[in-house]
Image (cartoon, helix red, strand yellow):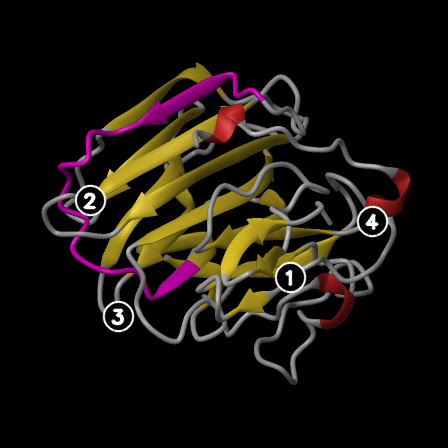
Amino acid sequence: MPLYSRINRSPTAESRRRRPLPTWQDAQFAGVQLANNFEGITPSGTTLTAGSGGNTGGISGNYFDIINIIAGGTVVSDSTHVAHQGMALQVATGATAGAAKAVWTTQLTSTAVSKIWYRVYLFFTAFPAVAHRFFDAETASTTTGSFWVDTTGKILARVSAGTTPLTSVTTIPLNRWFRVEGSIVGDAAVGQLEFNLFSSAMDGVIPDEPQISAPNLNTTGLNTKVSLGISGTAIANAGPYWIDDAAVSTIGPIGPVGSFPPRPVVISQSVSRGANY
């Protein structure tokens, strides 16, 4: 079902409270959903640390397996700009080119998967001085698909070879939050990239601009990990920009905050959808 045809609940006061995000894994449904709202990484300005012993789990949601920060870079919690609650993620690189990113790997999947759905809320105060990524998926050794904002404020979807099969017509808004959702199919022959830009209402159901490629891209292979932030080609002096309420799924489209797809209910050996979280 297309993302923009899903019916989701609007965020409520309850969904905005500081509590762990609903996440689950179910062997019968063969999928996983991960999310992080950065609420537990306090105080504002705290650098993220990875793993179960780091500071990105707990009430924030699913901890990140890896945090990469180039010298002079920034991957910190920040209360300056937030989408729904009291904290978001700020990322930037300095004079040294490199990465500034948070990564889900083993938490995402124990085996490589063909299709991944993603959601990120983004906040920019200016168009980037240099085009950079905000989300990507990878095989064990190379990118399957990546999503960028360029210097004119357009959303780009790229494959590992560097070609850009999708470019938004819409320009991202500045100084207010917007949402991007979509999917990546990792395959050397029938790969596919998708983004849905929600620029006029960050928690909207119908995107301002939906784009999906033909299922004929070379996205190299199956997905094994995803990254939030500035990744891939080393880039200097990128950002800062802000990410909030990030989520990924191997089950299906995610929707706005407060509308994770419901946990399945098994009835007579068949899987049915239950009530929304």
Of marks 3 and 2, which one's residue comes earlier in the chain? 3
With respect to residue 260, does 227 lie above or below? Answer: below
Disc 4 target residue? 86
Of marks 4 and 1, which one's residue comes earlier in the chain? 1
Task: Kindly report which numbered mark, 3 or 4, lies closer to the viewer in this rendering.
Answer: 3
Question: Which residue sits at x=29%, y=38%?
Answer: 193
Of marks 2 and 4, which one's residue comes earlier in the chain? 4
Mark 4 to mark 1 CA distance (whole Å): 20 Å
With respect to residue 232, does 190 lie above or below? Answer: above
Disc 1 target residue? 23
Label 3 SS: loop
Of the 4 image quadrants, the one containing the N terminus is top left
Q: Is residue 261 visible?
A: yes
Disc 2 target residue? 191
As for residue 211 lying within the magenta part, the answer is: yes
Q: Amino acid at mark 2?
A: Gly
Q: Amino acid at mark 4?
A: Gly
Counting the numbered discs, the total is: 4
Disc 3 target residue? 140
